[in-house]
Amino acid sequence: MSPDQVSSRPATAGRKSRVALYSIMGIGVVSLPLVLWMSQAGSSAGPLDRYATYRKANPSLGLEFDYQMNSRKLTGARAFVDSGKQARLDVKGMNEDYSGVMTSAGFTEVERSSGTYDVRNLVDEPVLPASRIAGATQVFPKWINVPNLRQLAPPDATVQIKGKERGLGVECDVVTATFGSPEAKGDAPGGVVEAAVAPDGRLARLSMTNWAPMQPRLHQSWTFRKFEAAPADERRYTLAIPDGFVPYSLDGKYGPVGVGESMPTSGWTATAGGNFDLLGKLGAKGGLIALVTPGSVPSQRARASLAKLQGAGLPVVVVSDGTSPAAAAGADAFDSTGKLVEALRLPATPTFFLVDANGKITHLWMGYDATKATEFEKDVQEQFATR
């Protein structure tokens, strides 16, 4: 969407947002508690402690790595991390051309093949949220901000030195932690975490494999071509938003109200005065609710399509995101408290909600492109007729 298709709404306050480390291991397949590796094999402490010491001495890292998830492979990803304060990821491959930047002020991402990006406010320590627009954030080694690798497996894991392998140009110790049921049995969750640690504590590779009953085996690995203290200039990473892209802000729920949720139907104020019966206005079959910003170009352009839809017999109600009659000119109703619009978590206007007789959202459209007005009107009528 371009700036003439939506009007950006003000940022809303973010909620606390954390990404559990087990989500990067199982992607919802296996939930692993954030607890310590219990080192039954004393020799394994050496490589793990070397890594912890290295990370404590080098909170800022410049990374280049290859990523693999099962049979899918991506080469040459780049990342920068600064001890949980900021991070950047650049990925090109696996059908993605993506950049993301995270700071304590927010998270910005661009997926250049889809032409969308978003900015969200974070109120706790920075984490890398699950991307709404690309799968690329799965590539990011979220565990990198946890310098103690013992936190990546449960306490009853069997930990041992597996051997040696070449990485980062040196001979590395390979440490494994195996937990849960053996993979061959598959009657209970289990997994393996494996790390290759260089003599100076740098990480050459980290792999995670887990399995669960009735679930496909998941294997992820990050093989580092570069793992080193980042120079100061890398800390000035920024992400320039291309011309024509539309910024929007999201709260902690990550995104607007969706299909299947209920539209707030009571509490609206009629622009002419008094309470506004939104469902009563739509009628027994429901209809289209258009939430607009009066005076904005995209909302003004949408009025022509709304008039055509009404003329074709579709029930239409126009509500304003303003909080006073003056800010609701041309709309049927407005939100005098601002609470109703806030509950919708809208990043932009105009937004169009098709609802049933009970106010449940059955379809929604965000933004209005005047060059595709006919297609929009046809889609709305078809969705109304066939739901």
Image: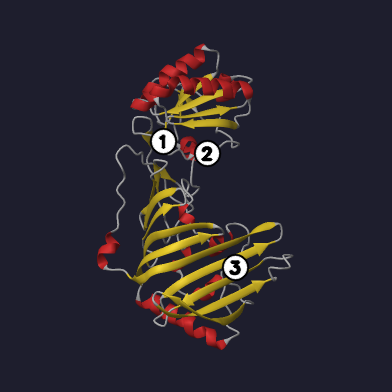
- Residue 33, labelled with which disc? 3
Q: Is residue 13 left or right of residue 231?
A: right
Residue sticking out furthest to the left? 233
Q: Which residue is mark 2?
A: 257
What scheme was used to colour the molecule?
A: secondary structure
Q: Residue at x 38, y 53 (%)?
A: 100
Circle 3/circle 1 CB separation < 8 Å = no
Q: Nearer the viewer, mark 3 or mark 2?
A: 3
Q: Which residue is mark 1?
A: 348
Q: Earlier in the sequence, mark 1 or mark 2?
A: 2
Amino acid at the residue labelled 1: Ala
Q: CA distance from mark 3 to mark 2?
A: 31 Å
> Percent x, y for residue 163?
54, 82
Q: Nearer the viewer, residue 22 or 284?
A: 22
**Looking at the picture, does residue 51 appear above or below residue 19?**
below
Q: CA distance from mark 3 to mark 1?
A: 38 Å
